[in-house]
Amino acid sequence: MISAFLLSSCGTAFLKYDKEDQLKKIDEFDEKVKIVEPNATPTPTPSPAPTAGTVAIPTESKKDLMEGKSSTSKSTKSSSKKSAAATTTAAATATKKPAKSAKGKKAMATDAATEPTAEPSPTRRQPELEDDEGFTGRRPNVDPFRVGEEVIHDVNYFKVSAGTLRMKVDPYATVNGRKAYSFKIFISTSSLFSSFYSVEDSVDIFMDYESLVPSVFQLHVKESGQLREAKMLFNEKDNTATFWEKKVTKKDGVEEKKQNWEILPYTQNVYSAVYYMRFFKWEVGKEYSFRVANDNENLVFSGKALRKEVLDTKLGPMKAIVIQPNIMLKGKFKPIGDNLIWLSDDDRRYILRIEAKIKIGTLVSEVTEIKPGH
């Protein structure tokens, strides 16, 4: 999404289409999905707050920062162990056998025959493909997201500002009656690059609060060469993905597409993956994986935490974890280029920097502003 506009043909203004409003309406999607987004001032997230947020740290040297040990991570691990112990104790209490009946062995035998047997809970977080450290079931012990969060990047190409990338966390929404995270991504070209090719793209992502499955995304593309509206629905009950698209281009005019395919449980889409990766701990030397569905295919995202370093940013030096992402299709790695992602080394795991090598040069997206939310 970040690099697409640089690889497209030239233009000087957005593509114009008289029936642009009709592109946004996809009747079948509207019949299946009801999204309610609040207009009121949001209340703070119910998840426990981290002990410290990500801030610039200009008062310490890089050497001190890299050698210093974080008490925050220790307290988080300790609290996770206590939480797990408490959960185990509660589960053991809940499954204690009832006291013997005064009516004797016959009554006990009857009760045992008629009382349903509780199914044992999973021994670890599902699916087993995913790392389970820092989670209780599907939920994270410490939620990295705060309502009102906004991370802003400057996107550079050959050290020239090409555009702006914004990643937001909006107030919780409901999707078909279920509480959901509301994430937004925006990307637009700078005035200089808009003289060659204009881009004003955005995507709305709704992720179920409990299962962390991205039930819906809505993509809005407004560029010199195309106008496009795309919507995707993940149905958790029958594990299917449905994708709808309406597109207008100068070359081909109006086109419509629909895809429907089976997916595996707890699958992400290509946009929710940007946020979903922030739920994991990312310990150096360890690989993390999760499922992704896109364009009629089921993939596996795999990322390896290469190292920790201090990243020089416009906000000052910031502790970061460097991650190398990969995609696996049908058991084989699918090259996605020489890309790297920097996450903040704290409980929030903000995306601080992205490097993507393309055919000519490298795109660099780096943080210029962080609004932590509340």
Image: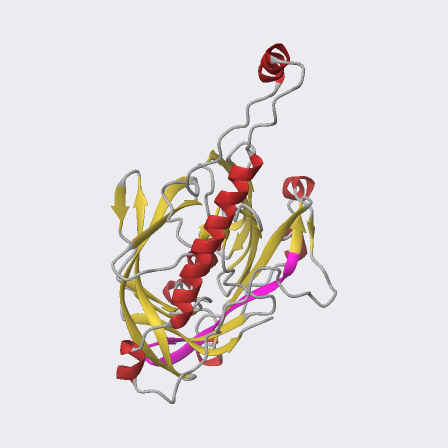
Where's residue 352, x and y in %? 40, 72
Q: Residue at x 39, y 52 (%)?
A: 133
Residue 308: quarter of image = bottom left
Residue 217 lies within the magenta run: no
| Vertical arrangement, residue 282 with respect to residue 237, above or below | below
* Closer to the camera in the image, 9 or 260: 260
- Image coordinates of residue 225 in percent, x first then y, are 48, 61
Residue 321, quarter of the rendered image: bottom left
Indicate yes or no whether the magenta region holds residue 169: yes
Q: Quadrant of the C terminus?
A: bottom right
Residue numbers of the magenta segment: 155-172
Between 258 and 62, the residue placed more toward the observer is 62
Residue 215's spot in the image, x, y percent?
56, 46
Residue 244 in view here: yes
**Rendered location of residue 4, percent (x, y):** 40, 62
Q: Is residue 269 visible?
A: no
Please tell me which residue is depicted at 51% across the width and 44% down the height of the picture: 89
Q: Residue at x 46, y 77 (%)?
A: 195
- The answer to whether 344 is drawn above or below residue 83 in the figure is below
Q: Quadrant of the N terminus?
A: bottom left
Magenta: main secondary structure equals: strand
From the viewer's side, name the closer residue of 107 and 293.
Answer: 107
